Amino acid sequence: MEEESTISPKYKWVALSNTTLGVLMATINQSILIIALPVIFNGLKVNPLASGQSGLLLWVLMGFNIAMTIFLVTLGRLSDI
């Protein structure tokens, strides 16, 4: 006896469009950070391209990603409550 699928065919397209929209928003978010980096480094009075300073660029990028991840999970959980 085979069970019929109760999931409508539209569900796959909704899931795909939501995932695609999420990836698009993450890409836009990272693009905004890349554009804002010169202003961030001017505010910190640091030249990330000077010798020995290139690690700072990576720290800023990773710090932003970690902060966004923490806020996303925390605020997502709060919105579910």
Image: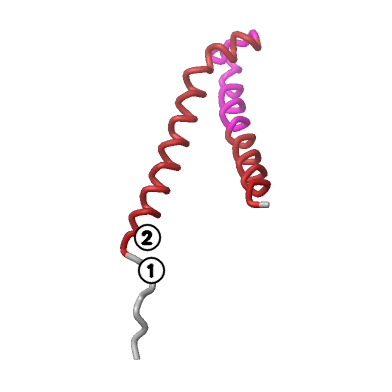
Q: Residue furthest toward the bottom?
A: 1
In this view, the residue in front, 47 or 74, is 74
Residue for point 65% across, 42% down = 75
Horizontal side of 59 relative to 17 (left or right) equals right
Highlighted magenta segment, given as a residue range:
45-64
Left or right: 50, with 28 as reference point: right
| Quarter of the N terminus within the rendering | bottom left
| Amino acid at dot 2 | Tyr
Taking the magenta stretch, the answer to whether it contains residue 56 is: yes
Q: How many marks?
A: 2
Let me know if residue 15 is in the magenta part: no
Q: Is residue 19 toward the left or the right of residue 57 in the image?
A: left
| Disc 2 target residue | 11
Badge 1 is on which residue? 7
At x 59% / y 8%, what residue is drawn?
Answer: 42
Label 2, label 1: how many angstroms apart (C-alpha)? 7 Å
Quarter assignment of residue 45: top right
Name the residue at the left extreme: 9
Residue 26 rendering spot, x and y as whole percentages: 47, 36
Instruction: Look at the picture and state if 55 lies above or below 65.
Output: above
How is the protein colored in the picture? secondary structure
Question: Which of 59/42 is in front?
Answer: 42
Mark 2 and mark 1 in contact? Answer it, CB < 8 Å. Answer: yes
